[in-house]
Image: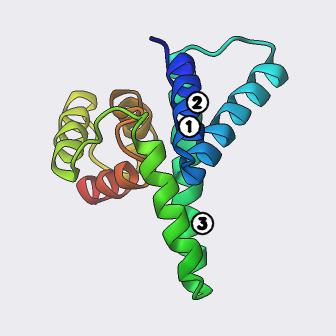
Amino acid sequence: MSLKERLMADLKDAMKEKNKIKKSVITMVRSAIKQYEIDNRVELDDEGILDIISKQVKQKKDAIEEFTKGNRYDLVDEAKAEIDVLMDYLPKQLTEEEVSQIVSQTIDEIGANSMKDMGKVMSAVMPKVKGRTDGKTVNKLVKQFLQ
């Protein structure tokens, strides 16, 4: 079952269960997928869909930070619930230790030894961890290793 088919099946289930949060999140993702396909005149595969879901998670995490600054804890809870729904569609997330190992190995492979090599390291690490962690975590760890 492709990710698109799974999203459609889960949307039907959410409607039957009257799960408003799950329904709205899946509708939002399907809308983003459709918009991307129309804008770029392509049919997205599962990998492309995972990219869109990852972007949605990142947006929700950024929103949580802003809601917290504005003392809008009702919106923080809602965004966290939406992230939980989105995470069901992403591959198992890597722990910080696992990402640290991947970064360390990549730095050794490339032979990076200063902050000037950060771009090379980031471009080599990101495909290895795609969809399984966010760029902020990778960026933080690369900086730690290169300093």
Cα–Cα gap, marks 1 and 3: 29 Å
Q: What is the secondary structure assignment of the residue under circle 1?
A: helix
Q: Are marks 1 and 3 in contact (CB under 8 Å)?
A: no
Camera-near label (2 vs 3) is 2
| Mark 3 Cα shell of 10 Å, populated few (<14), some (14-19), many (≥20) | some
| Mark 1 Cα shell of 10 Å, populated few (<14), some (14-19), many (≥20) | few
Cα–Cα gap, marks 1 and 2: 6 Å
Camera-near label (1 vs 2) is 1
Q: What is the secondary structure assignment of the residue under circle 2?
A: helix
**Which residue lies at the image location 46% right of the left edge and 41% below the top edge?**
119
**Which residue lies at the image location 39% right of the left edge and 43% below the top edge?**
117
Residue on which disc 2 sits: 12
The foreground one among 96 and 139 is: 96
The foreground one among 76 and 61 is: 76
Residue 72: name its quadrant.
bottom right
* Quarter of the image that includes the N terminus: top left
**For residue 34, side relative to residue 123 (left or right):** right
Tell me: residue 89, above or below residue 61. Answer: above
Q: Are marks 1 and 2 in contact (CB under 8 Å)?
A: yes
Picture disc at residue 16: 1
Residue on which disc 3 sits: 63
